[in-house]
Amino acid sequence: MIRLEGIGQTFLAADGSQVQALAGIDLAVSEGEFVSLVGPSGCGKTTLVEIIAGLQKPSAGRVTHGHAGQNGAFGWAGYMSQADTLLPWRDVLDNAGIGLEIRGVARAECRRRAAELAARVGLAGFENRYPHELSGGMRKRLGLIRMLAYEPEVLLLDEPFAALDAQTREVLQNDLVDLWRDFRRTVIFVTHDLMEAITLADRVCLLSRRPAAIKREYRVELPRPRTSLEVQFSQKFQALHQAIRRDLMAEVDWQKAHQA
Amino acid sequence: MKPPARAAVILTRLGLVLGFFGLWEAGAALGWLDALFFGRPSAVLADFWGLVISGQVFIHAWVTLEEALAGFLLGAVLGVLMAFALAASPFWEKVLDPIIMLAYSIPRIALAPLFVLWFGLGVASKVVFSFMLVLFLVFFNTFAGLKEVDRRMVDAVRVMGASRRQLLVKVILPAITPWVLAGLKSGVAMSLLGAIVGEYVGGNAGLGWMINSAAGLFQTNRVFAALVALGLMVVGLNQLVGRLERRALKWRPNNNLLS
């Protein structure tokens, strides 16, 4: 269970003015639930994830999760952003095992557990390769298992697959859903891709334009296991996609009109 | 582009070097070059060999090496520490930035006589001089490396629950290693330069002193013999650093953009 209560964030812009990015975000995500966050670009999705992860302090509100050391403590969540943050000087297994290593697990054991995970996501045979020797999709898969290896309760994913081509992205989405089904973690997944949001999640939350709040939530009542191919042509999916898109475009249009 | 054939490269290289020394030797033998000023390769080798037999070259090379190494180690350690200290404190970075730039832009070679005045004709003045040259190199490189560490990479590991110490050891130090090594690499040459120039200016031992005193007596072949010794020393040290670098950076992709 993870709960956001009245999260607000205000920045000091370069010209000295105050910019309010987030205002009063309330959200409760239950154990094992997969929630997607969507919203117009620049609305503060990344800011919100960084606040949940503990990398930013919110100017208002609080994040609670039932784990030792509340606000500001690390180690309870897994976090993956769009950026490639693998350590280039570590091979696949040492990268995947770093979370365990930090917890004091012996290196041989870290590598053994990393190897199991690597095999699950098709990285068998690449255990001793360095990140620059892997394809973009493989690096993302390594990022996923690096995050899962130390068994965090919550996974925070901030457009993790945005930099991938469409085909690879679809494969990675299926990998993620498989891992999620087997590990049963709570997932908060930020994306600007509605198709992705609906295909993956139990619930889609739409953020409004700045200052962002949760504008609406949509339950995704599609049967699992879902594969993107089957699901995206179903009536239910199309209807939901249209509904969210209409609400999203309303925010985008407002933003456009008021920036001009 | 097709990589050039190895044999052709080596043969051409050998040809150039042999041609150069051949012309020099011939020029001296035929009297085109005044042997008093220009020396003669065969005489240089003979003199060098004499220095090896008598052991003199080792005595002086050791003095120079000691001075350079001491300056190098001091400069490397303090350079890295200084970079960390400034990177950790934006206030002191701001305060010291122009002062460091000023200190750096003073041609430090010109200060050599002062160092001799302050620290004497012995080893100490050369060590301090070497140290000053290496310090800035290592400091600037390490500092630049620290500024370049990818925040997002650090954050990713921080979220996993890493302590400050773990972040330092597992992320920051490996991330700046290429930068520090680049500084150390040029630092090796710099530290020798410092020792040699220090010996020129005022000293009573070392290869620099040998070169300077031989030049004063028009012993041109002796000057070149000392240079041969110096060259061998630099090659050896570079090999050592190169090996260290390859070991530490074996994870790096080879991107040679110009070939």
Image: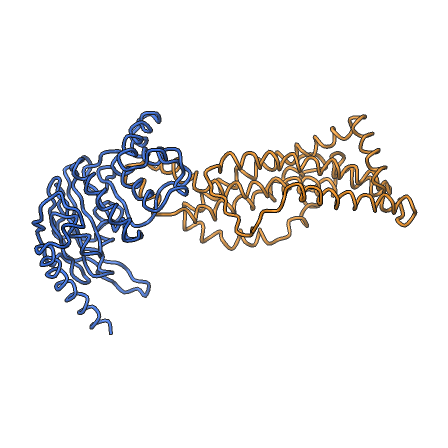
Front in this rendered view, residue B214 or B180: B180
Please report the residue visible at 12 percent of the width from the left and 61 percent of the height from the top: A242
Q: Is residue A153 above or below residue A50?
A: above
Front in this rendered view, residue A92 or A69: A92
Front in this rendered view, residue A58 or A132: A132
Find residue B76 and report its horizontal and vertical position in percent: 55, 38
Find residue A256 and report its horizontal and vertical position in percent: 22, 70
The image quadrant of residue B200 is top right
Q: Is residue B165 left or right of residue A36?
A: right
Q: Is residue A17 left or right of residue A248?
A: right
Please report the residue visible at 88 percent of the width from the left and 49 percent of the height from the top: B33
Question: What color does chain B have in the rendering?
Answer: orange
Q: How many marks?
A: 0
Image chain in blue: A
Find residue B147 and report its horizontal and vertical position in percent: 43, 49
Which residue extends farthest bottom? A260
Q: Is residue B76 left or right of residue B38?
A: left
Q: Is residue B150 left or right of residue B224?
A: left
Find residue B115 and report its horizontal and vertical position in percent: 67, 43
Color scheme of the displayed model: by chain
Please report the residue visible at 22 percent of the width from the left and 34 percent of the height from the top: A151
Which residue extends farthest right? B31
Q: Is residue A182 above or below residue B99?
A: above
